[in-house]
Image: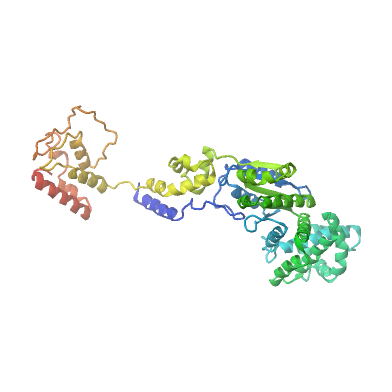
Amino acid sequence: MRACDFSRKKEESHMMAEDQPFRMLFETFGRTPIAHAESVNRQAHEQLVRWLDVPTSQDGGCILLRAPRAGYGKTHLLSRVRHSFHSTHETILMRASRGYRIDAATVLEDILRHLLEDQPGHLGLTRMDVLARRTMASALVPLVESGEVPCENKQAAIDALRGDPQGTFDFHNPRAVTAQWAKESFSALSERLLPHLARACDLPGREIGFWLQALFHYCSAELDDHRRHQVMEDKVCANAAGESGMMNRLEGLLALMTLGKRVVLIADDLEGFSSDRGEALNLATLIMALRQTVPRLDVLISLNQDVWDEVFVPCLSDGLADRLSERLIELHPLSEADMVALLDSRAPGWGSNILAHLDRNKTGTHARGLIREAAKAWERVHFEDLQPEKSANETFVAPVVQQIRQIPTADTKPEPQPGSALDLRRAQAHQPQPADVQVEEGTPLPFMVESVDAGARPQLAASESTAAEEPPIEERLASLDPEDQAKVETLLEQFRKKFGHGHS
């Protein structure tokens, strides 16, 4: 290995050691995964995409994503799905309050949090702004088509409402004529919009009317007025008494959202429900009620087999269990190729090497177990494979030092050592010591050193000790670094004191 190559390798090793690729064991929903192996859970991902990639008008369903145990990559898979549909779907995580409760109030809070975030690709607008403009535009189309709202160019107006609802209802643009007209006459206009929206949502006009008013006041307020977020949240909670009131609010909002986009509610990380089967039943009934009221809604439940068997199944009727699992996806153990691909995704090119150093009994066949063991082995595997090649100095000095240390003293009687003389000469000739030389006991060899009496020194055959075959030790020392020269000279001096000055 050239010096520059080794320096670069060493630098890369140091950087990779500091940035441990297997440090992160747990994914967080919504964040883009730090690494991904395409083959891992491929079938599950493809099936999820087929079920979710459907027209807005098509009914949704309930999908149960189940794994044999924790660590199979459920959250990683869900994050990939969310990323795949970020521009066409609203994917919202239903967070469990205190780890084991999901109800109408918590889901409504999660949806509001999602909608009040900035909308990607729409500078200064939130998802709530986009929803409000899209809702009013879709409700106005039937009025223009029927002539209830007259306009000079009916078809152009319809095309603008359908094709550019954001620009058409831009209340902050004085040149957006439709938006300014709607803002000035909203009280009268809302009475005409409401029946069409209620009919499209198949819900009573009371809750749809509430959301129409709330959305209009929100999106017509100044964009830099951050109080509008708090005003919206206060309106939602006002006059929504109890669970039934929150449920009505939730159903109305979801119905409006599904008019223009696919909406996916996701329940993940449900281990906390193991402490309360009653809450598992409440979650199941909530999901079934929402699916019945908002048929275009998709709900995705992600859990482990033990939670399903021990918590949900005992408290669910057969009908509820069947509805929750109407679309079932099972995750499977990792294959050998999957393991290599998963390791390669975090440490490119190292997958097979690292896997060979892992204890399969500890890794198991799930992603988290594999990554956990890889994290433990990373430092050892990584730096063993990047050890620098020995320099010429190290090749000469190390064997000489080792041989000198093993030279018998006057008080010892060495046993016959096969190959000792040859090994010493090879070290002095800068040759690597062969690792595969095996000598059977009692087999005489030409270079074998005979046993000697105490005080005697090993003798070399004349053909092997001729000085003409190699340069004197002084010349060879001249090529070493000063520090290495000093070490070898010290050792040689000790050698001469014990065995005489004839040996060099």
Residue 274 coordinates in the image, percent (x, y): 62, 50
Q: Can residue 155 be seen here?
A: no
Vertical placement of residue 252 versus 232, above or below: above
The reply to whether residue 113 is visible in this rendering is yes
Q: Position of residue 152 (x, y in %)?
A: 89, 63
| x, y percent for residue 437 | 27, 33
Q: Quadrant of residue 451?
A: top left
Q: Residue at x 13, y 40 (%)?
A: 412
Q: Nearer the viewer, residue 82 or 268?
A: 268
- Asked if residue 487 lies left or right of residue 363, the reply is left
Most extreme residue toward the top, as rendered?
443
Q: How is the image coloured?
A: rainbow
Task: Please tell me whether residue 492 is drawn above or below residue 336 in the rendered image.
Answer: below
> Which of the image's four quarters has the C terminus?
top left
**Identity of the residue drawn at 71% across and 60% down:** 105
Nearest the eye: 97 or 443: 97
Q: Residue at x 9, y 48 (%)?
A: 497
Relative placement, left or right, of 223 versus 334 is: right
User: Which residue reaches farthest right?
Assistant: 147
The x, y position of residue 371, in whole percent, is 50, 47
Residue at (29, 36) in percent of width and height: 435
**In screen coordinates, is 122 left or right of 10?**
right
Q: Name the foreground residue: 324 vs 490.
A: 324
Total tally of numbered discs in the picture = 0
